[in-house]
Image (cartoon, helix red, strand yellow):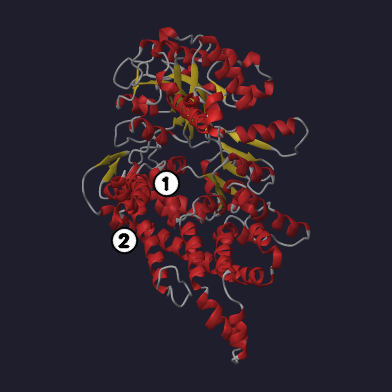
């Protein structure tokens, strides 16, 4: 009896024997099945069990995790966010099919009206929102940009507001120079000025000064409307170009991020720069806490006029499902709650359009200008340039000079 | 079974199998997007909208108007200057490491790439802390009662310093790899035959390592030409480069057609530089044997 026979006798069902090869095959099959299920799993789940997802497109600083978590728990939905740096970027995203990717979009100034004109957003049902705590200054009839230009539809709800004023080192800049846009073009402060890299706001601020100097700010405008620094005549744009080319030689830099400007302001390398007031607030708080000797002020509205914004929530036209529409309104309503607005004011430092003054320390009320909400009406609202192509040429000419 | 094996042995099938996936990838993710950019460059933009109105105005603007042409020339000049400085700096370093590095060669080369363990933004921020008005250099000078160095504060020089710092490891690595395979005994032969060290370098070392040097130049020139973050953060109000203008078209300006033309011009300029350098490489002279030349 050879070994083979003996083996075959002791194991009568040899064909069913578990060999190393069959174990490896089985393991490979199981692994493949696992990977397959893992990859297709999200697409084959029962639709009834899927969690509703609300997607918003906005400025990243509004992505407050605690608020998102609270809303998700309250309504059993998932909230996700996409971000942009400027209105035109969001506009391009929505135009390129973004209304299917996002349910809500943030915008400021005139931008919601532009979205509405292009059919990118739909009406917001104000009956579903509690606006009782919103300052009068940010809702109609006082603030009309929330309404479509050609109908009575409300197309947006307010969120936060602010200006694009100047933060000024009062120890370095003469008092008589502090409140004029001309400060940013003043040769006296050569090598101590800075501006942001945002081309629209640089041209718009220069446009305010140009129109003021040319005497065209209060006169009749070609479009029959009141002066808007984003709708400038060719002559005004030429003057802007001249001013901005002159300004280049006076600047330390054009800041891309707030950290850079803050460092330069704290080191007193830069004495004045336009900014959103957040840097001013941080430096001023340090002064109040005895950590800094710097004397800073923020000029919200310069004498020639300044830029301002009320950022808003709009619902994109891609939201057709009633359940999604409902939850989109609930999100806006949630963000308008006083507790949520207090969190936004304290954690990210933007001024709420909701009256939370009694919930905030005095220093926040002062530096967020919450006792001066009426000043928003004296500020030119952010808008799209009347001709992006012309503005681009002006800016390229300035950069090349 | 036999038929299948025969098919697999067919050189054309094997070639297609090997090249196919890579070629498909390039077609899908490089050629088609590039083609769309070429098409857009002949259109125009109006109020953030692309309009398929075929014209060559964008190319006339980019190549004919100083406000755009200046940035193209400035970027080419910057890339040439940065490549030249990297070359002058990296050659002796790579030479010393390759010849005298002994068993620490690899460690020394890897050390030059240490900054790459962090992201580009971090490296640029670090450069700001060194070069800026409140950077280490100028703060130290001011502490000593000296005037700060103005050219290091948000200028094109600061941009160049930042770019050199970023791309030197690429140049050094390319030259080092070339020298790694270089037979240094050839220099002894040259010396024995009466060549002075400089002549031996220019007639033996340099030509035999020109391919690695050319690769290093390409590896520095192209990313410098395409650099946007460094000039944006270090360059100051006058620091804008061609790519910054290009980004601007696709970003807040929304003038995509003009941006596309700038992209095409940039691509052609980059390819031209590679072509010119490629023409200078003599494979046989460089001792390259891989192509059967």
Are the residues flagged by discs 1 and 2 in contact, CB closer than 8 Å?
Answer: no
Q: Residue furthest left?
A: B54
Q: Position of residue A345 (x, y in %)?
A: 60, 22
Tell me the residue that label 1 is attached to. B248
Which sits in the foreground, A177 or A355?
A: A355
Quadrant in the picture for the N terminus of chain B: top left
The subunit letter for the residue under badge 2 reads B
Residue lying at the far top of the rendered structure: A127
From the viewer's perspective, is residue A260 above or below residue B165? above
| Numbered disc 2: secondary structure | helix
**Residue occupying image coordinates x 39% and y 29%:** A111
Q: Say what secondary structure mark 1 lies in.
A: helix
Which is more toward the observer, A120 or A362? Answer: A120
In the image, residue B208 sits, relative to residue A246, either above or below, namely: below
Q: Quadrant of the C terminus of chain B?
A: bottom left
Give the labeled residue for mark 2: B64
- Horizontal and vertical percent position of residue A281: 65, 31
Q: CA distance from mark 1 to mark 2?
A: 19 Å
As rendered, which of A372 and B35 lies closer to the eye?
Answer: B35
Q: Position of residue A326 (x, y in %)?
A: 41, 10
């Amino acid at each position: 009896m050879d070994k083979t026979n003996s083996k075959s006798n002791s194991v009568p069902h040899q064909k069913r024997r578990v060999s190393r090869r069959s174990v490896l095959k089985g393991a490979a099959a199981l692994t493949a099945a696992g990977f397959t299920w893992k990859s297709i799993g999200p697409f084959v789940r029962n639709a009834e069990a899927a969690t509703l997802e609300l997607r918003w497109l906005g400025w990243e600083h509004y992505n407050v995790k605690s608020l998102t978590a609270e809303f998700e728990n309250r309504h059993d939905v998932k909230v996700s966010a996409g971000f942009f740096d400027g209105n035109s970027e969001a506009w391009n995203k929505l135009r390129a099919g973004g209304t299917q990717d996002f349910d809500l979009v943030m915008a400021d100034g005139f931008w919601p009206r532009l979205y509405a004109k292009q059919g990118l957003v739909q009406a917001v049902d104000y009956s579903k929102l509690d606006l009782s705590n919103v300052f009068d200054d940010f809702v109609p009839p006082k603030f009309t940009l929330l309404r479509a230009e050609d109908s009575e539809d409300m197309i947006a709800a307010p969120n936060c507001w602010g200006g694009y004023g100047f933060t000024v080192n009062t120890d370095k800049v003469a008092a008589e120079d502090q409140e004029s846009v001309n400060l940013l073009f003043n040769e006296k402060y050569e090598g101590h000025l800075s501006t942001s890299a945002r081309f629209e706001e640089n041209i718009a601020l220069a446009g305010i000064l140009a129109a003021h100097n040319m005497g065209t700010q209060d006169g009749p405008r070609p479009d029959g409307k009141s002066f808007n620094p984003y709708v400038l005549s060719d002559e005004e744009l030429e003057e802007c170009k001249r001013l901005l080319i002159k300004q280049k030689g006076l600047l330390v830099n054009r800041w891309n991020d707030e950290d850079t400007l803050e460092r330069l302001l704290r080191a007193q390398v830069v004495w004045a720069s336009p900014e959103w007031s957040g840097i001013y607030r941080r430096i001023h708080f340090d002064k109040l806490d005895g950590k800094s000797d710097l004397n800073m002020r923020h000029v919200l509205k310069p004498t020639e006029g300044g830029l301002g914004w009320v950022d808003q929530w709009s619902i994109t036209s891609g939201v057709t499902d009633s359940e999604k529409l409902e939850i989109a309104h609930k999100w806006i309503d949630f963000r308008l709650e006083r507790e949520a607005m207090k969190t936004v004011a304290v954690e990210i430092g933007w001024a709420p359009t909701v009256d939370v003054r009694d919930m905030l320390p005095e220093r926040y009320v002062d530096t967020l200008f919450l006792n001066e909400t009426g000043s928003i009406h004296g500020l030119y609202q952010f808008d799209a340039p009347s001709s992006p192509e012309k503005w681009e040429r002006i800016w390229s000419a300035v950069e090349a000079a | 079974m036999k038929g299948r094996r025969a098919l697999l042995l067919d050189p054309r099938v094997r070639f297609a199998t090997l090249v196919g996936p890579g070629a498909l990838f390039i077609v899908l993710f490089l050629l088609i997007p590039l083609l769309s950019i070429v098409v857009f460059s002949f259109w125009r933009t109006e109020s953030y909208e692309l309009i398929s109105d075929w014209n060559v105005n964008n190319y006339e603007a980019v190549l004919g108007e100083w406000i755009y042409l200046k940035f193209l020339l400035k970027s080419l000049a910057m890339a040439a200057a940065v490549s030249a400085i990297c070359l002058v700096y990296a050659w002796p370093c790579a030479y010393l490491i390759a010849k005298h590095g002994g068993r620490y060669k690899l460690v020394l080369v890897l050390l030059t790439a240490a900054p790459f363990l962090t992201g580009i933004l971090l490296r640029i921020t670090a450069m700001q802390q060194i070069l800026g008005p409140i950077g280490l250099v100028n703060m130290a000078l001011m502490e000593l009662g000296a005037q700060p160095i103005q050219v290091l504060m948000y200028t094109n020089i600061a941009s160049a310093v930042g770019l050199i710092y970023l791309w030197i490891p690429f140049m050094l690595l390319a030259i080092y790899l070339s020298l790694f395979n270089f037979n240094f005994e050839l220099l002894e032969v040259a010396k024995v035959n009466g060549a002075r060290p400089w002549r031996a370098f220019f007639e033996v070392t340099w030509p035999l390592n020109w391919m690695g040097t050319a690769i290093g130049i390409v590896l520095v020139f192209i990313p410098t030409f395409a650099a946007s973050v460094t000039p944006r953060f270090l360059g100051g109000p006058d620091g804008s480069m061609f790519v910054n203008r290009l980004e601007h078209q696709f970003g807040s300006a929304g003038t995509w057609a003009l941006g596309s033309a700038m992209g095409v011009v940039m691509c052609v300029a980059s390819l031209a530089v590679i072509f010119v350098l490629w023409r200078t490489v003599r494979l046989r002279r460089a001792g390259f044997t891989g192509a059967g030349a």
